[in-house]
Image: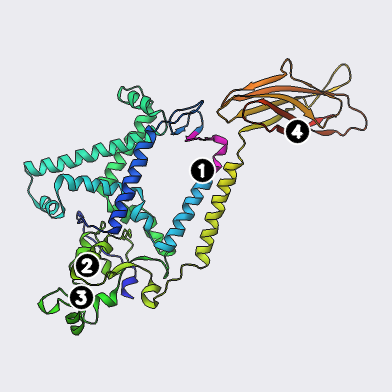
Amino acid sequence: MQNTQTKVVTQHAVTIHPRSVKGRFRSFKSIVLVLAYAVYFILPWLPWSRPVGSSQAILFDLSEQKFYIFDLVVHANEIFWLAALLFLAAVLLFFSTALLGRVFCGYFCFQTLWTDAFRWIEKTIQGDRVKRIRLDKQSWGVEKILKRGGTHLAWLVMAFWTGLTFVLYYAYAPQLVVDFFTGQAVNAAYIATFVLFVTTYLTGGLMREKVCQHVCPYARFQSVMIDKDTLVPTYDYKRGEGSEGRAKPIKVLKSLEQRQEKGVGDCVDCGLCVQVCPVGIDIREGMQYDCIQCGLCVDACDTIMDVRGWDRGLIRYESENGLDKGKTHFFKLRTYGYGLAIIGSLLFLFLSLSGQKMIDGSIHQVRSPLYVRLSDGRIQNRYELKLHNKTMYQAKFTVAIDGLENAELDMGRIESFDLKPDEIQVLMAKVRKVVSADDKDNIDLQFIFTPTEGKSKEPIMLNSQFIAR
């Protein structure tokens, strides 16, 4: 089928000026754009009340090795959650691609979102598509210098704001902004802002669709993930071309009856689907790797069909099987596999979060030497106990041992100890015991930390061994 064959179209190095269009897919893109920008630019400034720690809702504190995400505090030793999230994101991408093609590219990709914003700035300053094309051909003068200069200046401001906002996620935003503009911020803040500033300006303002066409690898391996049951923006070739091809709606070819009588398809060859395309392709030439499948060509064609009073769907989201056989098979082995992987990832994250230990501990037996024989004949072992209070509240504990009969726990003068919010405390302990001939060389024992104050009510138990010989 011509409409579903992947084709590579050679394009000249010209600036693409997409035409504005209204429709359900354009509206959805705009909603996603506004929400994404609101989340990205507002979150660093959102305050959040905590008993201890940063008062910023989202903060990735690298110096303290803690990630603050609202009420959740992720520590460095829990970074495996990041691996689970990355795996979940990858599987979601594969799953959505198998069902809906490059829907991520068309609506949610950072490149798409920032390119849309930069094009909106360009349209606001330079005018609609016709005016921008005319400005390109116009010789350099005051008008062109002002409009082009104003556009690039606005792009630079937007790019700088983007870069600075990214840095604000890694420090307390109000103070960092003051330090940044007074020259007191750390060098990493200036370097990161500059790198994001330059790359955002280049990719969003200058390269635009060329990033999707020549830089992003996703466009190259999408054909491996898309099959005959994947919904993608598709031109209905049979309906649009008929037996005699497409034709303009001239006087004798205005009504559907006249066109069908002449064997002409429903496509009136207006070219609007090409004009609105952000990557400048003609969807009527079949699926192409350049296509980011944003659906704007669907809006454009539906607009023309509505004007003429004809049925929508000449260009629509459709699969090859749906177009040929009238039925799309969504549920099959691949989609079941992706679905199970998504459920597994979500279940793992849920169990990890719900089972997170608010107070974590570890024990290290000091083995230099392995043990000491005291003057009274008893054997002494030394231990290093470490407790980490991950809660935002103070806790208090007593310590005891279990599993070792007739043993003495010596922690100096410490009978109980306080653990401040988000504090790591290391304690030294000695265990002494008279070893009999019946005792094993290595005897299992357990340190029990019993909470007496704080929100944690369950005792913490750390297993170790007592070396007797």
Which image quadrant for residue 406?
top right
Q: Residue at x 31, y 48 (%)?
A: 33
Q: Secondary structure at mark 4?
A: strand
- Indicate the amino acid at tag 3: Arg
What residue did someone put label 1 on?
82
Residue under numbered circle 3? 246
Q: 306 or 77: which is nearer to us?
A: 306
Nearer to us of marks 1 and 2 is 2
Q: Amino acid at mark 1?
A: Leu
- Judging by the rendered image, the residue that carries numbered circle 4 is 464
Q: Which residues are magenta?
A: 67-82
Say what secondary structure mark 3 lies in. loop
Q: CA distance from mark 4 to mark 3?
A: 81 Å
**Sequence-first disc among 1 and 2:** 1
CA gap between label 1 and label 4 equals 31 Å
Question: Which is closer to the viewer, label 2 or label 4?
Answer: 2
Q: Is residue 63 left or right of residue 468?
A: left
State yes or no: residue 78 in magenta.
Answer: yes
Can you say which quadrant of the picture contains the N terminus? Answer: bottom left
Q: Residue at x 62, y 41 (%)?
A: 355
| Residue 51 percent location from the top left of the image | 51, 26
Asked if the residue at tag 3 contacts the one at tag 4, i.e. Cβ–Cβ closer than 8 Å, the answer is: no
Q: CA distance from mark 1 to mark 2?
A: 48 Å
What's the residue type where badge 2 is placed? Asp
Check the image and name the residue furthest to the right: 437
Image coordinates of residue 3 in percent, x first then y, are: 31, 72
| Label 3 packing within 10 angstroms: few (<14), some (14-19), many (20+) | many
| Local secondary structure at mark 1 | helix
Name the residue located 37 percent from the left edge and 59 percent from the top edge.
Answer: 102
> Which callout, 4 or 3, points at the residue further toward the start of the chain?
3
The residue tagged 2 is 306
